[in-house]
Amino acid sequence: MMSLNPSTFETIVPSRYLTFSFPDPHRRRRRHLRVAVLDSPSAVISADVAAVWVPPGRETDWIFSTFSGHLQLLLSSTTTNQPLSRLILVGKTPSQPHPSSYNSDLHHPSSSAPPQQNLAPLLLALSPKSAFLDNGEIPEIPFLIYEDDVVKSSVLEICVGPCVGEMLVENVELEIDGVKEFRRRLRFKRMPNFVQSQIRIVPESKSRFKNLPNFEDLYFELDNGVLVQSYLSPMVGGISVISQFLEGQMKNIGFRPKALCLGVGGGALVGFLNAQLDFEVFGVDNDEVVIEIGKKYFGLESNEFIHLFTDDAIKYVETLAENTIEGDKFHAVMVDLDSSDPTVSVCAPPMGFVRKSVLEAIRDVMHDEGVLVINTIPSSKLDYERLICEFHGVFEELYEIDTGNGDNFVLIATKSKIENALEANDGPFLSKLKSVVSRSYIDSIRKISKKNTIAL
């Protein structure tokens, strides 16, 4: 915290991040608020400024207490469909420097929030000159509401990985359309608004039938039979494109399909492919601590049919492509990698992945009838079109699934031409696939024609 000259805020300075204490105008007793001011990292035409009152009880959450969390809030917020030039966070001073457990029952949303009119003079003082209208009218700084489904959380562990930095494992209670659900989550401090991995958990019987007063006291069992990360089920559904080939191979005694997972996280996808679809899975993650966290908290295993490696995914594939033999090639390559740059919106895959040499290396480790399935979070429509163009330059056919969440698209690429890929009969493999992921994702797969690809 630091004392500031009011003139400091008259101009927008890209990526400038300042925090300070301010007396709470709503309280007679001495209490200070934490105020954090962040300017957009890029030049924006809009002079729009907005504020967010930090949800009571969540002041220690990295989403609200760090530069990276604040930045993601700014990049994902708009007023009148215009990007913000400055976002101001106001809330109680955090009680400790690290994330703590949360219980919404103890914090009514308006119980400790000063009336907006009490904060208006502060917000105006923190607004740039460009926000004031030419006609002399005083601007009204809107308060944006932060909402998610979390009603309770319990911190299990905070640790540091050599590649991803600080990470947090937590149990959360969600309320989705009035229905209570429990999940275990992994989040990174460098991008805390994005859930890296999550699985469903259910209270153990000894917890269900005891009136335990605290969420932290509940005991949970892991439920790895369902994928709760919104894009993982569509990714698994993408394997259906080669279901006819897999059906034929499964007639051979001892055949087991092989999958390469680039990006492991908590291991939900790795475990699901093995347990539900009988794949032999090779998982690669660049951070050994992430893999250990997966084993400790998410049920990730390393056994005869699950092989885990600590390596950079791109280097691993390029090395593998130089040494692989036909019998070791993969029937499915599943890619779940996101950008590690916290100064941009969440995007996937990282830019270094979308190079022709990397895509060719992936193609070389794929079986001739194999499939590449990749989670994408495009930063813009143009970037997505460029990504499609790159894939079309290396792979024979390309398909797409819109996950329906507004952010993720799953791309499916094949090394060879697949006859009637979207009209396969329901043999044993496809029937099993449709029983473990929503068939709506499989039915929604559409082919992306090369003639519809823009030339860049």
Image (spheres, rainbow, N blue to C red):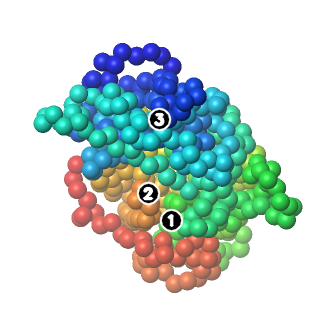
Q: Which mark is residue 234?
A: 1
For label 2, count other residues whose C-alpha is less than 10 Å away and answer few (under 14), some (14-19) or many (20+).
some
Residue 230 pos. (x, y %): 53, 60
Residue type highlighted by circle 2: Asn
State the residue lying farthest toward the front.
28
Q: Which residue is mark 2?
A: 408
Q: Which mark is residue 441?
A: none
Residue in the foreground of this view, choosing between 336 and 408:
408
Q: Nearer the viewer, residue 24 or 163?
A: 24
Residue that badge 3 annotates? 90
Circle 3 packing at 10 Å, graded few (<14), some (14-19), many (20+), is: many
Which residue sits furthest left? 135
Residue type pointed to by label 3: Val
Look at the numbered disc 2 and give the secondary structure of its residue: loop
In the figure, is residue 453 to the left or right of 157?
Answer: left
224 shown above or below 300: below
